[in-house]
Image (tube, helix red, strand yellow):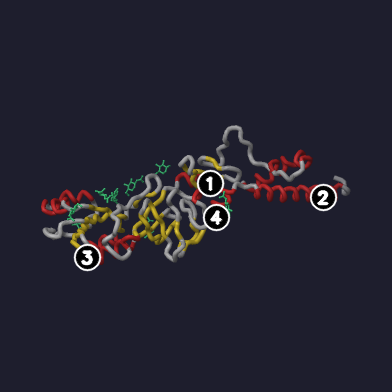
């Protein structure tokens, strides 16, 4: 190579780099807003770095699973899952673990509305550490048999009764006078507690102990399988409310599961789509710019 060539090379490379920087900025400015917005994480009280499957704060609802919206207006973060409001105690992204306590049992064993604890099929499930306690309401005030792990308690205008058994099949072994007493109660609900709380309630089946156990909360684990695939392909996880299905927000557009699946007829995003770039430069350099951008994001 002749020495005279170097200055020309220098300017040529600088030129390429300038275009690359300009081009990549423009591509960034063109990133799908849902991709950008769903890459936000937020803090909610003591809960840090909240992301999918949750929405709330700076994460619009399409960035989370429907209903999993954290309410951070208070110091105590809350979430309402199918009508029931829970205090959020912890979110653990390693074990995909959402620890919550029912808010309606924060102070009182007699809620005004009787609701079973519900989960979300395919997304939220209980863990093996969760055990149901059955609480009966509207039971006859008289005639409650005393029985292990059980206690009667008063509510305004009705009588309650709870049995702490870790396995519903235990009901089969109940004495017949207890079975017929429970059958005469008007309502029952299932509330989960952790194994450790269950042990304390079993050793002292009092309302105080039960309330304490309920407020220690229990865990939901969430199903991450779709999100793992999406994230690995460079996308941000979310939900498409129109199709009522998971959505993977990619830099250029939302896709069903992964940013690596190319929809029929779609072009890969290049600097060529940047409107402010002159066509002359495009003609010569768009291939190079695309290569650079791809290499950078790879
Ligand atoms: C994304 O977030 C910005 C800033 O909060 C907001 O102005 C914009 O409307 C959001 N875009 C979409 C598509 O929700
Ligand atoms: C979930 O988190 C809670 C509190 O951080 C912890 O006690 C529990 O063991 C965790 N459960 C699982 C299944 O990781
Ligand atoms: C997790 O979600 C996927 C997709 O919805 C589903 O196919 C799978 O059965 C779920 N797994 C569990 C353990 O719920
Ligand atoms: C949900 O959890 C229960 C109890 O831990 C388990 O038996 C069941 O298989 C789980 N279901 C799914 C879909 O993960
Ligand atoms: C608790 O009870 C519900 C029914 O209300 C049941 O679907 C769920 O599997 C039970 N959970 C455990 C941990 O036994
Ligand atoms: C059960 O409900 C019925 C109808 O509302 C009511 O008449 C009855 O007193 C209730 N039983 C108890 C034990 O509260
Ligand atoms: C009381 O609860 C403990 C712990 O779950 C259980 O081992 C025991 O069988 C229960 N007793 C009865 C009579 O159900
Ligand atoms: C709660 O679930 C139990 C067991 O599935 C059911 O028997 C009971 O009627 C439910 N209670 C309410 C208030 O829905």
Percent x, y of residue 138? 20, 56
Give the mark nearer the N terminus: 3 vs 4: 4
Question: Viewed as shown, does residue 84 lie left or right of 243?
Answer: left
Kindly report which numbered mark, 4 or 2, lies closer to the viewer in this rendering.
4
Q: Nearer the viewer, residue 195 or 91?
A: 91
Q: CA distance from mark 3 to mark 4?
A: 45 Å
In contact (CB < 8 Å): disc 3 and disc 2: no
**Image-quadrant location for residue 288:** top right
Q: What residue is disc 1 on?
A: 232
Whether the residue under disc 1 has CB within 8 Å of ligand 3: no
Q: Residues within 10 Å of mark 2 (few under 14, many from 20)?
A: few
**Image-quadrant location for residue 146:** bottom left
Q: What residue is disc 3 on?
A: 206
Q: Is residue 219 visible?
A: yes
What residue is at 18 percent from the left and 50 percent from the top? 171
Q: What residue is disc 2 on?
A: 11
Percent x, y of residue 222? 41, 50
Q: CA distance from mark 4 to mark 1?
A: 17 Å
What residue is at 53 percent from the left and 56 percent from the top? 58
Give the mark nearer the N terminus: 4 vs 1: 4
Percent x, y of residue 103? 35, 60
In contact (CB < 8 Å): disc 4 and disc 1: no
Q: CA distance from mark 3 to mark 2?
A: 82 Å
Q: CA distance from mark 1 to mark 3?
A: 49 Å
Kindly report which numbered mark, 3 or 2, lies closer to the viewer in this rendering.
3
Specify the label residue 125 is tagged with.
none
Percent x, y of residue 156? 23, 63
Local secondary structure at mark 2: helix
Q: CA distance from mark 4 to mark 2?
A: 39 Å
In contact (CB < 8 Å): disc 4 and disc 2: no
Q: What residue is disc 4 on?
A: 40
Q: Residues within 10 Å of mark 1 (few under 14, many from 20)?
A: few
């Amino acid at each position: 190579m002749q020495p005279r060539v170097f200055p020309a090379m220098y300017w040529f490379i600088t030129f390429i780099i300038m275009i690359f920087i300009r081009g990549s900025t423009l591509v960034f400015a063109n990133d799908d807003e849902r991709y950008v917005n769903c890459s936000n994480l937020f803090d909610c009280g003591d809960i840090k770095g909240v992301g999918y499957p949750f929405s709330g704060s700076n994460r619009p609802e399409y960035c989370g699973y429907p209903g999993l919206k954290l309410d951070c207006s208070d110091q105590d973060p809350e979430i309402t899952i199918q009508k029931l409001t829970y205090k959020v105690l912890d979110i653990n992204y390693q074990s995909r673990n959402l620890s919550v306590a029912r808010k309606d049992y924060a102070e009182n064993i007699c809620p005004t509305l009787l609701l079973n604890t519900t989960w979300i099929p395919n997304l939220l499930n209980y863990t093996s550490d969760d055990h149901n306690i059955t609480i009966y309401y509207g039971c006859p005030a008289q005639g409650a048999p005393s029985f292990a792990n059980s206690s009667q308690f008063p509510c305004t205008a009705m009588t309650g009764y709870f049995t702490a058994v870790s396995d519903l099949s235990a009901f089969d072994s109940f004495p017949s006078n207890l079975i017929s007493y429970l059958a005469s109660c008007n309502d029952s609900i299932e509330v989960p507690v952790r194994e450790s709380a269950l042990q304390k309630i079993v050793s002292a089946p009092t309302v105080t102990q039960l309330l304490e156990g309920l407020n220690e909360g229990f865990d939901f684990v969430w199903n991450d399988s779709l999100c793992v695939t999406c994230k690995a392909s460079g996308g941000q996880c979310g939900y498409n409310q129109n199709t009522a299905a998971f959505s993977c927000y990619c830099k250029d557009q939302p896709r069903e599961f992964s940013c690596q699946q190319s929809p029929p007829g779609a072009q890969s995003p290049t600097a060529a789509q940047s409107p402010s770039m002159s066509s002359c430069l495009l003609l010569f350099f768009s291939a190079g710019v695309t290569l650079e951008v791809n290499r950078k994001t790879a």
